[in-house]
Amino acid sequence: MNKEKPFGLAAEFKTHEDLLCAAEASYAQGYRKMDAYAPFPIEGLARALGKRNRVPLMVLIGGIIGGAGAYYMMWYANVVSYPINIGGRPMHSWPAFIPITFELTVLCAGLTAFFGSLATCGLPKPYHPMFNLPEFERASQDRFFLCIEADDPIFDATKTREFLQRLNPLNVAEVPK
């Protein structure tokens, strides 16, 4: 019988400290394609998994592009495209450009934060292989899971299972696709 390759191996832990220690040990062992699941946010877990948050940089770039685009749009309209001298004011009256520049900076930064968060989280994702694991239902209640994916370059089913067993989990289970 041809058995399908699993999604990975998941270890179930009782406390968040155990999960954090297991994530640090897994990263130190060389595993890179892994994820952790917990019923509440755990300080330092993303760093322990080796994950980096790119959203703040994306928001900064989105805000700069929005502000620069707004300022350029108003400058071009007032100075180049349709120059009308009203009341003897200068063509490039930058104080009048500030409110719109600020508003478009905030708008573009906010939209970048929203769509950037969705994109980096891989959302929307109505299905995930971890849902096939019967024990995973407790991940939203009182259990903590660390899943090392089979796509990891150093993943070997038996060696990875032995490694996870050394971390003293409650259970180690194969996650079907």
Image (spheres, grey):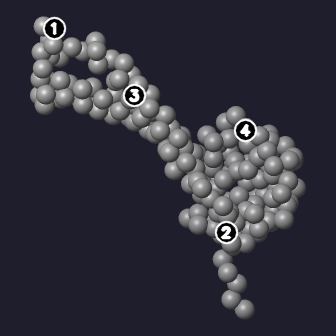
136 and 6: which one is in front? 136
| Gap between marks 4 and 3 measured at Cα | 30 Å
Residue for badge 4: 41
Q: Position of residue 86 (x, y in %)?
A: 15, 13
What mark, if any, has residue 107 been given in the picture? none
Q: Amino acid at mark 4?
A: Pro
**Residue 105 tag number:** 3
Q: Nearer the viewer, mark 1 or mark 3?
A: 1
Q: Which residue is mark 1?
A: 87
Determine which quarter of the picture holds residue 150.
Answer: bottom right
Is residue 159 toward the left or the right of residue 136 in the image?
A: left
- Looking at the picture, how far across and down is residue 78, in whole percent? 17, 24
Residue 9 seen: no
Q: Among all residues in the image, which is located at the extreme bottom?
A: 1
Tell me the CA gap for discs 4 and 2: 24 Å
Report if residue 125 is visible in the image. yes
**Residue drawn at point x = 73 percent, y = 72 percent:** 176
Q: Earlier in the sequence, mark 1 or mark 3?
A: 1
Q: Earlier in the sequence, mark 4 or mark 2?
A: 2
Question: CB under 8 Å between callouts 4 and 2?
Answer: no
Query: Which callout, 4 or 1, points at the residue further toward the start of the chain?
Result: 4
Q: Residues within 10 Å of mark 4 (few under 14, many from 20)?
A: few
Q: Amino acid at mark 1?
A: Gly
What SS does tag 1 mark?
loop
Q: Is residue 152 above or below residue 50?
A: below
Residue farthest top in this picture: 88
